[in-house]
Amino acid sequence: MMAARGMIVRYATPLHKSRGNVLQCIARRNASAIAVPTSTAPEHIEYDVTKEASVPNPDPPADSPTAAQLSEHTPYMVATYVRPPPMMVKGEGCYLWDAENRQYLDFTAGIAVNALGHCDPEMAKLLYQQARTLIHTSNLYHNPWTGELSKQIITKTRSAGAMHTASKVFVCNSGSEANEAAIKFARKVGKTRTPSGTQHEILSFHGSFHGRTMGSLSATPNPKYQKPFAPMIPGFKYGTYNDESSIDELITEKTCGVIIEPIQGEGGVNVATPSFLQALRTRCNDIGAVLIYDEIQCGLARTGQLWAHQILPKSAHPDILTTAKALGNGFPIGATIVNEDVAKCIVTGDHGTTFGGNPLACRLAHYIFSRLSDPQLQSSVQEKEHVFRKHFTRLQQKYPHHVKEIRGRGLILGLQLATDPTPIVTAARERGLLVITCGTNTLRFVPPLVISEREIEEGCGILEKAMDVVFVEGGQEVEGTKGQQEMAPAGR
């Protein structure tokens, strides 16, 4: 009966159906399936039958309603992403549902965005209230929420023991915009100190990802992504992450700014050593350069502290701190936090944004930041890290030739594999778990921070089953899922 299940016409179960109706639909579907001794179905249909019988959450096949809808939409969309077959239509907490009513436990959180989970009830309530009150006026007029959010970010950042010189905030719409502002501000500081313009260079590091706009892309030294849009903006230099011996040579009198992720997300969940960050700070002080910490992915409680850098002494704190992603929990917003030395160099007209700081985004971010700055939530993140690491250690012991290293802090964790991890991504998804990749052969885990221990156990159990399929059963029939990281190595 299970083998014939894929022969029945598939339904896209409407989301408004009750759970009982859904179960009745499934029951009718299975009741009509009959075992037959032979099949005359086309080969691709027989493959779908076998696949649907062997995995609990198979991707929608070519004859599904999802595939039909994608065929209708795809010709009108710029092909900037490669996506797997499911179409997500609903989310709640740590789970997503696709158009075929398949459920997925989400270990991706929209690439470290949905820190409070999908469709947080209070956020949805505030969105509705503010949308009925005031959405946008432009920055030509005051609104109450831009200032409230800015004040909250500064006061809570300093009280948490992070960036002790934090003074002012520029609110924008995304992480790339936040980094663009940081780069411009660093250039303006350099121009203020040396009006001749000689102090203009920006240093970033291999393995970094700072965005896709031209300034942030120029700070992201990945040839595959820079080459199509070359030449990059002049004045960018690149160093080796965690290489202290090269700092004096890289940061010179021409350097106006250094931008670095305390934990590289897209680059492979690589953690900067405290001594490396301290050495950067010291050299920047000597030269008069601005130190920028990009915490767009690793900040906002993801490490178990409000900011990833707050474990460092004050002597290693940045001049500029950028954030986005979790700040909006899915609603577009970013922010660039600066100290007074930077702020005094920026005057009216130096920078701006049409939508940034709108009252709707800022009211939502004010609520989200208050949640993420809660010490109890941050403590729970540290506890959940231990649960993940327990399972990852067991997987490493089970597959020592495949699982080479466990990296990260809090709930930004990476499993370094010896081979391409994309078949595991596929096998996990078809068993009800969403995971993504980063760097080279690295599985990345950035789940909602509100994930429960039970959900971690559930997801790690599915992950182990996926590894069993790929590593033990050969995996030759498991096709890898492409496009599951922002900037993949060539050929991925």
Image (spheres, helix red, strand yellow):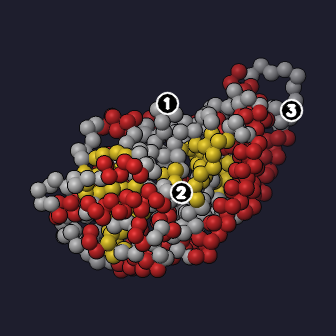
Question: Going 54% across and 69% down the picture, which residue do you hit?
Answer: 305
What x and y, as percent, mark residue 55? Answer: 76, 38
Gap between marks 2 and 1 measured at Cα: 24 Å
What x and y, as percent, mark residue 352? Answer: 25, 64
Question: Going 77% across and 42% down the picture, which residue do you hit?
Answer: 398
Of the two numbered discs 2 and 3 on the same chain, state the one appearing first in sequence: 3
For residue 491, the mark is 1
Question: Going 72% across and 40% down the picture, which residue do you hit?
Answer: 400
What x and y, as percent, mark residue 212? Answer: 37, 47
Image side of residue 78 versus residue 378, left or right: left
> Disc 3 marks which residue?
34
* Element type where label 1 sits in the image: loop
- Label 1: few (<14), some (14–19) or many (≥20) C-alpha neighbours in 10 Å: few
For residue 112, the mark is 2
Gap between marks 3 and 1 measured at Cα: 43 Å
For residue 280, the mark is none
Of the two numbered discs 3 and 1 on the same chain, state the one appearing first in sequence: 3
Q: Which kind of residue does numbered mark 2 sit on?
A: Ala
